[in-house]
Image (cartoon, rainbow, N blue to C red):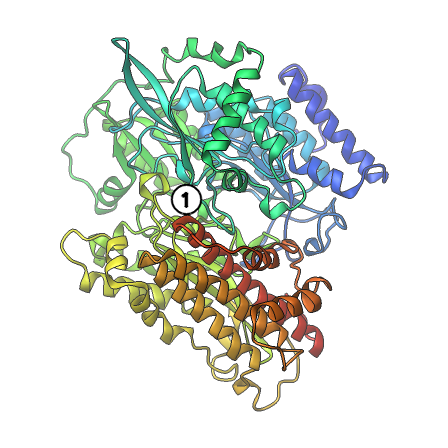
Amino acid sequence: MEKNTNWKTILQDDIPDQWANEIDHFEAQIERKRQGAVADKVFAETRLRRGVYGQRYDNGKRHDGTETRDLVFPCGDLTKGPETVWDAPGMQRIKIPFGGLNAVQMDVLADLAEEYSDAVLHVTTRQDLQLHYVHIDDTPDLMRRLAAVGITTQEACGNSVRNVTACVLAGVCQEESFDVTPYSRAMSAFLLGHPDCQDFGRKFKIAFSGCREEACGLVRMHDLGFIAQKRVINGAEQRGFEAYVGGGLGAVPRQAKLMEEWVSEADILPLAQAICRVFARMGEKRVRSRARIKFLVDKLGMDEFQKLVREERSSMPHDSAWTDYLEGVSSGEPGPLKGAGSLNGEPRSESFSQWLMTNVYAQRQSGYGVVTVHLPLGDLSSFQMRGLSDIARKYVGDNVRTTVEQNIVFRWVCESDYPDVFQALDAIGLSDPGAGTVVDITACPGTDTCKLGISASRGLAGQLRTQLAAKNEFLDDAIKNLKIKISGCFNSCGQHHISDLGFYGASRKVGVHSVPHFQVVIGGKWKDNAGSYGLAVGSVPSKTVPKVVDVVTERFVQERQKGEVFQDWVGRVGKKEFRAMLEPFMKVPAYDDDPGLYTDWNDPREFSTRDMGVGECAGEIVSLFSMEITKAESEAFEAQLSLDDGDWKQADKRAYQAMLLSARALVRTEFLDLPNDPQSIVDEFHTRFYATERFFDKYAGPKFADYLFARHESSRKDPDRDSAHTLIEESLLFIEATHACENRLTGAATGGVQL
């Protein structure tokens, strides 16, 4: 069928009425917006709640230089914001609850990518799928075709309950308490479009995990998370969950805290509803940067928050949907398509043996395994998606899932079918080994398509993957299992906080040029459901990151003790020594000495200011700001050392001092005689940069400055570990914002063009 087919008419009998009405309403809103009858902000939230994002692009090409499909629709500068080019090509996010897919859905997704996008599908870190370069006029029909096969984009974005995620091994895991799949499915369906979830200040993310020790659902980085457990009550074994609340990554991460030690399976939906009601009623609505539930939990304290939720729960009228789904839990999820079999002893190729070692997990059900399809950077083509749907039909049926590590898995693969599945994957270019290893790098879109991207996270990930894969067979076993995760900015969409080695995008000014950088993050932990969060210990130019990875991993191999994992080695070496490893890479040579450092991965253009007529000594200029901001960065690092030593008070004090030094560095670009006392610094910063809004980031607004003001106004006599950790994170973000402000101001003063 041609693209202009009237899908609304053709599919009307296949789409649930409620979903059809939602899509019709959205289509009407598009037309009203075109007529000028809908305000920009209202329409922005409308399209976001349907999963439609604005995106960054460059004249019909990806930022890695590869061609997209012919862009026959109107194009505009999306960096100006959705209000000015609301109908330009954008990104469509597609919700896949717990990552579950079937072959029919996979075929439709392949068709849509080919017809409406650039024939590429992207798996996200929330088990969603995304299509890029989609025109908004195409989105209603795209949504109808998805809805006809049981997929919705409703509330994939916006201030809503996002995709509910769950462990991809649920039901087949060797360690789990029980299969959490039906509970995650029920939660997703129950909260979708629920009236109690329509008045949030920000997004709300939920996850399910079958066990506590592994990564599974990464519960501790979620707004609300459930970990499965069993108890014997009145002589009978019952299913239930630990409930965690108030987690999240983003600019200032929080680990979720245990709210309830036991929630019966019959109570998880009403508990979630009660939490949503409290969040909607009491959560921040005006200051967006403080509007996640983690800030409400911090403000109230867990005891008071728990009390409010319990009161809310007791006042809610009964809803049969709370427990109706339980009738189907005992019947279980789809089982195997074929009978169990064992892998015979025939000779194996080296490539098959490597793939078998890294990409296949033995299920607890004898004779079956889970096969992970390793997707570099989370991408696959329409052709490859159709190939995967053919494999699913032949070997596993409906047992396909997307993963939070941006891969796809086949569950219930018969062991005797491993060679045939490998050959089928090889035929479509998806037989790479290394799933879940150091070459399986997670990265957000970064500067390829994201409007907030600072540095090229995908470009760096691709380079690291190539570098590590080339010497994979020579890597020490301890290195092969490391997690590397990369974000294009501080928002942690690439989950850099919970990796062994994390990186997030930043920029630095050297003379009159800007240099793409990445902050190096250590101390994170993937296991134990995101067991700990790392902190940035230094910023290095983007192009030197591969060398940094080499130096760090080689030293780890040389120095690690028997059985010592990377996190333990980092703790033993200490952040001070770790930073010393980075310092040789932190120094940026003059532009004329190494102009390659002044460009980012897969982009030959200068990273920032171009064609400025640089003087002969410009490469050696060191501004007063550069000297003073270095003091702030050093103080923030010392705060981390105090945190590691258990001195919360000193960590808090130094993080506050880091913000003061950073603000002072900026003020002294205009007022050299600034008194060196906290009140004078804060007052002058407020007058010169906050009240004038010159400090404000285009997207973040005043929130980074608010971190300084909040701490300045607080006595903070007895900080604890969590509050000190948070303030350090805020100080690092404040410093980054100060760099960005100085870049904007000096760029404007010289007539430079800022990217």
Residue 80, given in percent of the width and then of the height, sits at 71, 55
Is residue 338 something one can see in this rendering? yes
- Foreground residue among 209 and 657: 657
In the displayed structure image, the side of residue 605 where residue 427 appears, left or right: left
- Foreground residue among 171 and 735: 735
- Foreground residue among 746 and 55: 746
Q: Is residue 208 above or below residue 115?
A: above
Q: Quadrant of the C terminus?
A: bottom right
Q: Quadrant of the N terminus?
A: top right
Residue 517, given in percent of the width and then of the height, sits at 49, 66
- Foreground residue among 447 and 300: 300
Q: Could you tell me the amino acid type at mark 1?
A: Leu
Residue that appears at 29% across and 64% down: 552
Residue that appears at 69% across and 26% down: 23
Residue that appears at 43% across and 52% down: 719
Is residue 605 something one can see in this rendering? no
Q: Is residue 290 above or below residue 489?
A: above
Residue 305, given in percent of the width and then of the height, sits at 50, 32
Mark 1 residue element: loop
The quadrant in which residue 557 appears is bottom left
Residue 626, given in percent of the width and then of the height, sits at 53, 77
